[in-house]
Every structure is written in C-alpha cells, then in structure tokens.
Amino acid sequence: MNDAIRFILNGEDITLRDVRPTETLLDFLRLRRRLTGTKEGCAEGDCGACTVLIGRLVDGKLAYESVNACIRFVGSLNGTHVVTVEHLAAKDGTLHPVQQAMVDFHGSQCGFCTPGFVMSLYGLWLSSEKPGRPQIEKALQGNLCRCTGYEPIVKAAEAIARARPSTLFDPLEKTRSDIVARLWALQPRETIAITSDAGKLVIPGSVEGLARILAEEPTATIVAGSTDVGLWVTKQMRSLTPVVFINHLSELQAIKVTEGGVTFGAGVTYTKAFEVLAKKVPALAGLINRIGGEQVRNMGTIGGNIANGSPIGDSPPPLIALGATVKLRSASGTRMLRLEDYFIAYGRQDRKAGEFVESVFVPYPAEGTHFAVYKITKRRDEDITAVLGAFYLTLDDNGDVHDIRIAFGGMAGIPKRARTVESDLLGKPWTEATIDAARDTFDADFQPLSDWRATAEYRQLTARNLLTRFYLETVGTPVELKRFEGVA
C-alpha cells in the first residue's frame, strides 16, 4: 500500500500526500502552484479556458491529450505528465510556434480564453502533422471565445500546419525520452490510499484490486473520466468519500475487435472508441463527434456513461438499438446482461453492491440493415441532449419490417425502447402510410417531462418526426449534411 500520488508537472516531479478526494487539477495549479495561465471559466468542462495536456504511456509510447482541468481530479494524475501553457515558451522567452501564430494572426482578443485555445492547438500540433480545417475545427470544439474570434484562431492553426518544419522549437521533443523514462518509474504497481480530513481516495493497482476495494467499500464513488462526477463537485458542491480512481487501469482500456462486433473496456474513452467506430459503425462515430468537446471526449468513457445511468446519456440509446450487452464484475465473479435490462428506473440500475461495469460488447449492424442515430440539442456542438433517438431496421425480401429496435434518451427516466411503436411496425410494409399510423403510438411508450432543455410536447413531436426522418433516409431521401463525416 502506497500513500502518495506522483506525477510530473511541466518539468518537475511532484509527490503529494495531502490530497482531497475531490481536489481539482485547476485548483491545484492556480492555488497551490500559482500557475494562473490556466483559467476558470465555466467550471463544468464546457468553455475550455482551463485546458491543459495530460501525457501518459500507452503501449509503451507517450501520448498527450487535451483535458479540462476544472473537472479533472488530482487523484487521477498518478503516473502522468501534466503540461500547462507556462511550459510552452523557451527559457529565453521565445514563444512556441503555436503561441507566435496566435500573435501573428491576431487570435487573441480579450485574452481570457487564449491559453486554453493555445493548449488545444498544441495538442493538435502533437497529434497531427498536417491537420486540415475539419480537424482544426474538431480540435477546437471544446473552446469557447466570448469575443467571437474563431476565424483568426483557425487561420493561425492553418498557418502552423502549412509551414511547420521539424526544426521548430517544441519543449516536449527534446525531453520526450526523459519523460518516458520518468513515467515508467511512476506507473502504479500497488494500491494507493490517501486519507485526509476531507475523506479518502483510493487508486487500485489492478482490476482485481478494484473488485476487492469495492467489496469493502460498496458505496464508494468510482471515477473514470469525471465528466459527470466533476460537476457533482464544482456545481453541486457535493462531498464524496471514498473516491476510487480507475482511469489508469489498462485492463479497462482494452478494445477487442472481432468479426461480429467490438468489446470496449469500461475505461475506453470516446476518443479511442471513435477510432474503431469510424470504420465499423459510422453513424455511432458521428454521434461521438457531438459529445462535448475534444477535452470531454478525451476524458469521458463508454463505461462511465453507462454506469451513471443518466436518462440523457448519449451512448446507451444507440447501443441498446444495436443489441449491446454489458459485463458486470465484482469480487465474487462476473455476469452478463442486455444493456437495455441494466436500466431499471431513474437513478436505479441493475448493479449489485460491489459490482462495476467492466466492459460492453457492441454488435455491428448486420449486412442489409439500416441504423441511424439522431441527437437533438439547442446548439449543434458541445451541448447536452434534449432528445436522442436510435433506430435499427431489417426488412424482409418483400419490403416488410422483419426486425426493428427503437431506443430513446430524454423521453423517460431511463434510456428506453419504444416497444409499442416497434410492435405497431413489425411485420408491416415499410411505407409512409405505415409510418404515419405508427406515429401516434409514441404516447403509449413515453410520457416525457418538461425542463429547460425542451418541453414535453416538443420531445413527443420530435420523437415522431425522427421516425419519419429515419423512414425518409432509408428510402433514399437525404435530410442532413453530416459536418464531420469521415474525420478521424
């Protein structure tokens, strides 16, 4: 058992034994370290002003991702390299090429959001040699500029992509091998437990250790990406203890691709899932592109979205429509169940004390089937869902409905199938008349609520219209231009 968290901050080795379970990286940087280039804007992972990079070893190689420091907990940093905007310029004050391009193209207006934009573009710099405009816009989805200065920022990014020689100064290129060696020494090999006046945090050394910990602490809060739990702390001011961090467990980050589908470990992030789904299930990959911004997708996990059980979680409805199954694990063993059976009622899931989501199996759509996902929000990108519909359809040789699965989020207290609508469609010809007749049966399946995202009437009408839209697309009527289609 260890009692300290160890990571690298810019170039400095950090050892912490006095960490609150819910201390955010943003507070640590600004209050403890006085690194005030990282800004607090929204404190909910929305505006990107707090963007930093987190480097970690993946299959022995060093990979960096942009994250929101405002909802990232210090307890999740063990064995990582944290890079802030202060680390980019050379010691003599020479700006990094990304910073200089922002100056040259007047990308900074009031300046408050500028460090976050710089760090997002730096993350793109590290991951892509020649990004095009779609990749640049995708990388900046999670950064908001209140001065409406996006075009100069994009032009700065394009200029870097056009003119980037290998000789340009970059602080991580010269130190990469040293960072790798230092991170190897920091990888957790045993459980870390830290107790303070604010509570207890635990970092298990393995999945088996996680199961044992949850057997002893069945009410512990499990934190993977913290894209939901972070808001419990920053917005609801909740005190959580004990907190168990699992984002470092490689067993939960495994992706197994087979002929019939893909198994995602519960700790697989949206970013990593996209790399597989863009080739195998493009409709689902398109949805991932609209889940938060790049920082949220780098942190949020498939398993966390399922385990949280939110009625407006984006991934459960399409996974239910595809027939996904979930694997639950505890100290006493494992069990499998259909994902749709995992959700019982609002705030209740079929997860026994001490159990956790270990993985989810996602079948590929069968050849000749139609599969589509529609996310309805007030703004297109980086917004919480009002209604999300997923449709899976197989027709027989006569053009009649052989199999259909329809699942919605935002229409009930849980992600839920439209069983009555499905029954009304099954065995009937796939025609406009059939669709029109089935529209009214949504009332038997859903009685949605009104909230600030949408009224009950709007949600019910939207669900009906999405069925019609799905029909029109299956018969060859285009409805929407998919903005990021084909962007990997």
Image (cartoon, grey):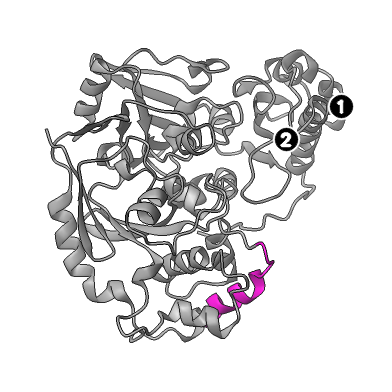
Q: What's the residue at 24%, 13% (across, down)?
A: 332
Tell me if residue 157 is in the magenta stretch.
yes
User: Which residues are drawn in magenta?
Assistant: 146-159
Q: What's the residue at 31%, 35% (across, down)?
A: 245
Q: Is residue 9 left or right of residue 111?
A: left
Residue type at numbered disc 2: Arg
Image coordinates for residue 273, horizontal then vertical, percent: 44, 46
| Visible residue check, residue 259 | yes
The answer to which of 19 and 50 lies nearer the viewer is 19
Q: What's the residue at 78%, 20% (across, down)?
A: 442
Tell me if residue 14 is in the magenta stretch.
no
Q: Quadrant of residue 393?
A: top right
Q: How far is the residue under mark 2 from the one under mark 1?
A: 27 Å
Numbered marks: total = 2
Q: What's the residue at 28%, 42% (across, down)?
A: 248
Quadrant of the drawing holding the N terminus: top left
Image coordinates for residue 360, horizontal then vertical, percent: 41, 30
Relative to 74, say whether 431 is above or below: above
The residue where tag 2 is placed is 453
Relative to 437, say whether 65 is above or below: below
Dominant secondary structure (helix, strand or loop) of the stretch shown in magenta: helix
Check disc 1: other Cα within 10 Å, few if <14, some if 14-19, many if 20+: some
The answer to which of 441 and 227 lies nearer the viewer is 227
Image coordinates for residue 19, horizontal then vertical, percent: 28, 40
Residue type at numbered disc 1: Asp
Image coordinates for residue 222, horizontal then vertical, percent: 36, 29
Disc 2 is placed on an element classified as: loop
**Residue 436's disc number:** 1
